[in-house]
Image: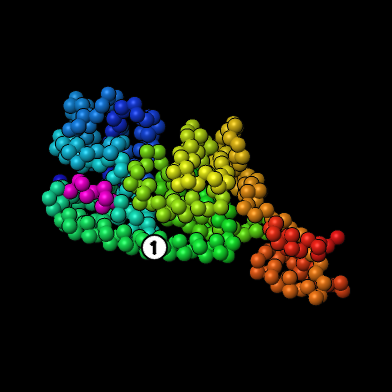
C-alpha cells in the first residue's frame, strides 16, 4: 500500500474518539482536529463511540469498526487517527480490518514535534521520544515499521533507522541520551552564568496556540514563528526585553502544552520546560476567547507544580481579548491583552515590574567628584540612564535595586 503524500494530494484523515468518560471527549476531539491540521492533513470527519471499556483487540466495538471501514472506503480516507494511545495489537488489527494506515494521538503529537523542531536539542529530544514510543511497537527486526513509506506519523527517525534491530535502536537511544546530557549541561552553564550576572528571566508558558510567540514578537521584535497552528514553536527562544523602569530581563518563549500530553513526552522535553520553570517570573498565557481558557490556565499550573515552580510569581495573561466582549473575572492578578494589536501591553509590563525579584526604582544622584568611582560600579551593576558633570559633581539618573539604593541613598539629588 503506497501512501505517498504530495502537496496536490493532502492526507485525508478520519478521526476516531473512543469515549470511556475518563476525560472531556468532545473538547479532546476538537483539539485533535487542530492537531491534525497542524500536521498538514485534512480532518475529513470524526466518528465517536461511548464505551464502558476499550476493546483490547480493536479499541472500538466490531460494529463501529465496520462503520469506520465503510466510511474509509467510501470517502477515500488515507489515515485513521485515534484520540488515545493504542497498543501495537490494536493498531495491527484495525489496519487489517480497514486496510488503512492507523496512528494514535501520541504518534500525531510526535509527528508535529518532528515537523517543528529546529534546534539540535529539539531534534534530539524528538528522536529520543519517538524511539522510546516505537520500541515496544517493533516486532522482530522492525517489520511492522518497514511498511511505513512516509507521511504523517512517520516523520523523525525515518525509515532507515527503524528498519534495524532492537539492539541498534537501543544503542541509538543511549547515544541520544548522552548527546542530550551534553546539551543540558551547556544549558545549565548558561543559566548559572545568567544567575551570576544577575540576569532576570521571564518565561512565557501556556497552552499551545495561545499566542505566546505573537506576544514574544510584540514585546521584543524577536521574529519568532507565529502561526495559528498547534506547536508552532517547539524550540525555546530567548530575547532581551527592556522594561519601562529601565531594567532589562531575558524573555523566554517555550513549547506549548496540550491536555493529556503523554508522560514520556513531558519527560523528553523536561530540560526545555525546566528552562521556563526556573525563570524568575512566569507568564501563564491563555487564549481568553476559548471556552476552555480557565482549563488551559490550570493545565499549565499543574505542569509547573510538577516541576516545583509554584513558588515563583506566576502572572495569568489573558490573550486575544480583542475577540471577546466579556472579559474573564475572578482570576487574581490577571492581565488582559491582545498581543496581535499590542493592547494591554503597558499593563503587562507594569505587572512584570511589580514582580521583579529585586525591587527597583529610578533615582537621581549627585556624586561628589571624589566619589565618581561609584558611577563606574553602577554602570556595571545597575541601569544608567543619563549622566552630566555639574559644578557640584556628577549628576546621574539610574535604576537601582534595594541593595544598591541603600548604598547610594545619601547622594540623592533634590
Badge 1 marks a residue whose secondary structure is helix
Q: Main secondary structure of the magenta part?
A: helix
Q: Is residue 79 left or right of residue 252?
A: left
The residue located at (66%, 48%) in the rendering is 354
Of residues 54 and 322, the one nearer the viewer is: 54
**Residue 338 visible, this angle:** no
Report how many numbered discs are placed on residues in the image: 1
Dot 1 surroundings within 10 Å: few (below 14), some, or many (20 or more)? some
Give the magenta-colored segment's residue range.
130-138
Decide whether residue 136 is among the magenta residues: yes
Q: Residue furthest bottom?
A: 370
Q: Position of residue 163 (x, y in %)?
A: 16, 55
Decide whether residue 318 is among the magenta residues: no
**Colour mode of the rendering:** rainbow
The residue located at (63%, 52%) in the rendering is 356
The quarter holding residue 47 reads top left
Q: Position of residue 313 (x, y in %)?
A: 58, 46
The residue located at (53%, 53%) in the rendering is 279
Task: Locate the C terminus and report the quarter of the image it occupies.
Answer: bottom right
Q: Position of residue 121 (x, y in %)?
A: 38, 59
Q: Is residue 111 above or below residue 168?
A: above
**Residue 164 visible, this angle:** yes
Q: Residue furthest right?
A: 391
**Residue ID for mark 1:** 183
Of residues 368 and 397, the one nearer the viewer is: 368
Amino acid at each position: 500500500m503506497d501512501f505517498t503524500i504530495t502537496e496536490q494530494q493532502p492526507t485525508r484523515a478520519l478521526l476516531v474518539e473512543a469515549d470511556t468518560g475518563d476525560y472531556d471527549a468532545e473538547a479532546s476531539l476538537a483539539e485533535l482536529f487542530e492537531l491534525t491540521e497542524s500536521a498538514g492533513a485534512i480532518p475529513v470527519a470524526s466518528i465517536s463511540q461511548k464505551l464502558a471499556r476499550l476493546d483490547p483487540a480493536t479499541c472500538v466495538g466490531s460494529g463501529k469498526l465496520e462503520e469506520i471501514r465503510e466510511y474509509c472506503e467510501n470517502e477515500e480516507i488515507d489515515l485513521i487517527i485515534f484520540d488515545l494511545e493504542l497498543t501495537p495489537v490494536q493498531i495491527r488489527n484495525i489496519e487489517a480490518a480497514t486496510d488503512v494506515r492507523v496512528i494514535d494521538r501520541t504518534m500525531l503529537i510526535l509527528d508535529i514535534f518532528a515537523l517543528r523542531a529546529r534546534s539540535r536539542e529539539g531534534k534530539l529530544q524528538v528522536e529520543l521520544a519517538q524511539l522510546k514510543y516505537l520500541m515496544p511497537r517493533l516486532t522482530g527486526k522492525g517489520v511492522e515499521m518497514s511498511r511505513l513509506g512516509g507521511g504523517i506519523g512517520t516523520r523523525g527517525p525515518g525509515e532507515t533507522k527503524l528498519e534495524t534491530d532492537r539492539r541498534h535502536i537501543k544503542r541509538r537511544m543511549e547515544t541520544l541520551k548522552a548527546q542530550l546530557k551534553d546539551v543540558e549541561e551547556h544549558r545549565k552553564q548558561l543559566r548559572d552564568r545568567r544567575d551570576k550576572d544577575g540576569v532576570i528571566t521571564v518565561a512565557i508558558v501556556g497552552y499551545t496556540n495561545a499566542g505566546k510567540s505573537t506576544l514574544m514578537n510584540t514585546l521584543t521584535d524577536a521574529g519568532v514563528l507565529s502561526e495559528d497552528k498547534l506547536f508552532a514553536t517547539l524550540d525555546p527562544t530567548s530575547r532581551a526585553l527592556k522594561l519601562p523602569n529601565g531594567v532589562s530581563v531575558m524573555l523566554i518563549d517555550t513549547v506549548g502544552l496540550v491536555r493529556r500530553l503523554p508522560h514520556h513526552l513531558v519527560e523528553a522535553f523536561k530540560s526545555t520546560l525546566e528552562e521556563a520553570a526556573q525563570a524568575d517570573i512566569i507568564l501563564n498565557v491563555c487564549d481568553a476567547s476559548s471556552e476552555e481558557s480557565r482549563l488551559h490556565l490550570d493545565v499549565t499550573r499543574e505542569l509547573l507544580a510538577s516541576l516545583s515552580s509554584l513558588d515563583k510569581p506566576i502572572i495569568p495573561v489573558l490573550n486575544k481579548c480583542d475577540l471577546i466582549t466579556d472579559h474573564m473575572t475572578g482570576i487574581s492578578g490577571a492581565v488582559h491583552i491582545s498581543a496581535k494589536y499590542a493592547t494591554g501591553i503597558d499593563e503587562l509590563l507594569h505587572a512584570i515590574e511589580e514582580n521583579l525579584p529585586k525591587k527597583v526604582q529610578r533615582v537621581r544622584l549627585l556624586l561628589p567628584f571624589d566619589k565618581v568611582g561609584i558611577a563606574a560600579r553602577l554602570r556595571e551593576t545597575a541601569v544608567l540612564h543619563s549622566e552630566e558633570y555639574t559644578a557640584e559633581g556628577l549628576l546621574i539618573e539610574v535604576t537601582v535595586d534595594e541593595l544598591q539604593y541603600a548604598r547610594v541613598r545619601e547622594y540623592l539629588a533634590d
